[in-house]
Amino acid sequence: MIDLRRATDLWRRCDIVVRDLPFGLLLAVASLLPALHGKGTQVGDLPTRPFDALAFVVIALECLPLAVRRRWPAVCLALVSLGFALDQFHAYHVLASNAMPIALISASAHLERHRRVTVALLSLAYVQLAFTLSRLGAAEKVEGYVVFYLALALAWGIGAWLRSTRAAEAEHRRHVAEATRAAERTRIARELHDVVTHHVTAMVVQAEAARYLTAAPDRLDATLSAVTDTGRRAITDLRHMLDLLKADHDTDVGMPSAGELHTLVEQTRQAGQPVEFTEEGSPAESAGSAEFVTYRVVQEALTNALKYAHGSPTVVRVRYSEKEISVEVSTGGPGSRAVSPGGSGRGLAGLRERVDALGGEFSADRKAGGGFVVRARIPAGSPS
């Protein structure tokens, strides 16, 4: 059996002229049928004449150019108009004369340049057609010519509407593509920020601490080992993120979850930040993206604690329920570096966008007695 889908794909890959040719051939064949003689468009009401050799030329002029109506619309319109005029002058009134409005619609829809000039030339040609038909004895009145001109104008208008619709759709697709690319760039930048900032901040803090441990070789060795481990974890996380950017990636590759919070807290402690971690309940099976966002909230808050309140006690509380995950990360007063927790604001802004996308609530505020607190309420049940 013929695979219809494969046949359709092959047909779509054919040149546009090949795809437009069958309609013109079908119209030409139909125009040759005796039962359809005299069934074409009539302007001027001249008595119908029988076919002769010129009639076949007229049919060819009106039908075959339809094959190029989208590739060369101006050429198609010129040839079809010539065939139409000859058809009316000789009063064949073949079925092929119905190709005139089709050529007008195609020209209006696909002609890129000189559209106004084309309309003016067609209008002048129509006036000349009406004048010549009148000299040949046509009984058509002026209002009849006007009505037919309006019908041709309607065909041109339909083509113009199709053109504007196609342009609007193309513009919409362009905007969607740009928005998609922008969203993807934002997502990549956000992931880079979360992965790189946390690990690099921990490494910088550990390296600074190592300066003052030259007299304690054991502690110095442990600190440098922690720096090395943090660097390796950064490389691993970056590789996981690059895997996510591949077209054939597994959506679960490198996606941290709330279950890895213990490892995250331990890494922060190794960087010299005293962290008290409290976890209530367990993640629901349907938590999905909520776990990932929870991890990022805690990660960014601990990164800010390392950067701006190094050495200050930090408390992390995570509470799971069936409907949501609540997160609170707070620090005491400023430690060895008293700086605003917000920094550039990119990390916190990214967290707010993530939480908002799941329909949750996010806040990051200073505490009255110094330090800062980050709170998030993340609805569970959002599939990743």
Image (cartoon, helix red, strand yellow):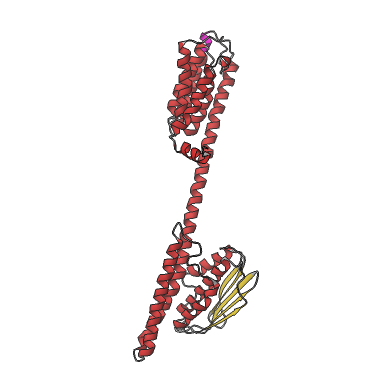
Quarter-wise, where is residue 147 in the image?
A: top right
Tag count: 0
Query: Where 283 sits versus 270, above or below?
Result: above
Residue 326 location in percent, x, y?
61, 73
Magenta stretch: includes residue 316 = no
User: The magenta stretch spans which residues?
Assistant: 132-136
Give me the residue at 51% from left, 27% from top: 23
Residue at 62% in and 65% down: 381
Residue at the extreme front of the image, as rendered: 1
Residue toward you, 250 or 292 = 250
322 with respect to 217 (left or right): right
Q: Report the residue that reaches farthest toward the right.
A: 322
Q: Is residue 135 magenta?
A: yes
Which x, y percent locates residue 256? 51, 70
Residue at 44%, 60% (x, y): give it.
245
> Looking at the image, is 79 positioned above or below residue 187?
above
Where residue 279 appears, x then y in whole percent? Answer: 59, 79
Residue 340 seen from this side? no
